[in-house]
Image: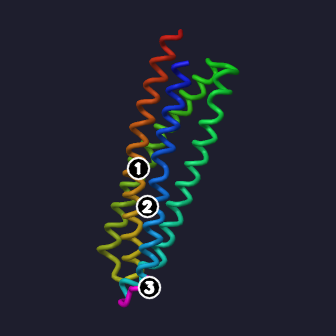
Amino acid sequence: MDILKASTDWAKAELVSTPFFILFGVLFVAASIGFWQLGKTEVARAYIIPMLVAGVLLTIIGFGLFFTNKSRLAAFPGAYDRDASAFIESELARAEGTLKEYNTVVFTAIPVIIAACAVGIMLLNAPVWRASLITAIAMLVVILLIDGTAYARMDAYHQELSAKKGLEE
């Protein structure tokens, strides 16, 4: 039963964390509207579409993660009651896969993309390109910050599952 509590605690923590994607998405959309309404220069107007796209993407990510984790939270008790050892194995496998994905995507690919965008800012002079690259960097930094904390939670959850699995064997 401790494993079920650990799983539900992890899912509840994720439910608290994922709305930050939505919050930042709304802030990006608000910035886009601000540039649309108040932007007088070509540079300011160049931010309208990139900020809107980034805001919509972050909002979609946030809602997707929220509803996925909400349904997972509801499914945990039934899956645990049906077969506790299979539940532990599936959660361990999912946690390990997620940690590998974080290492590949969040901690390797995103920093490389940020560096490429920074180089692009130095090489490209068109306001639309610069605005797009700066917005991409801002969005990726938001993802990096939120997913960095999610990685720490997932790692702690994985370690807890591993320790409790070892106690049951």
Quote the CA–CA distance across marks 3 and 2.
Answer: 20 Å
Counting from the top left corner in percent of width and height, residue 115 is at 33, 61
Report crowding for label 2: few under 14, some 14 to 19, many 20 or more residues within 10 A (C-alpha).
many
Disc 1 versus disc 2: nearer the observer: 2
Label 2 element class: helix
Q: Which residues are magenta?
A: 36-41
Residue in view at x 44 percent, y 45 percent: 104
Residue labelled with disc 2: 24
Q: Earlier in the sequence, mark 3 or mark 1?
A: 3
Residue labelled with disc 3: 37
Residue labelled with disc 1: 146
Report crowding for label 1: few under 14, some 14 to 19, many 20 or more residues within 10 A (C-alpha).
some
At label 3, the amino acid type is: Gln
Disc 1, disc 2: CB below 8 Å? Answer: yes
Quote the CA–CA distance across marks 1 and 2.
Answer: 10 Å
Between residues 133 and 149, which one lies in front from this camera angle?
149
Residue 137 lies in what quarter of the image? bottom left
Disc 3, disc 1: CB below 8 Å? Answer: no
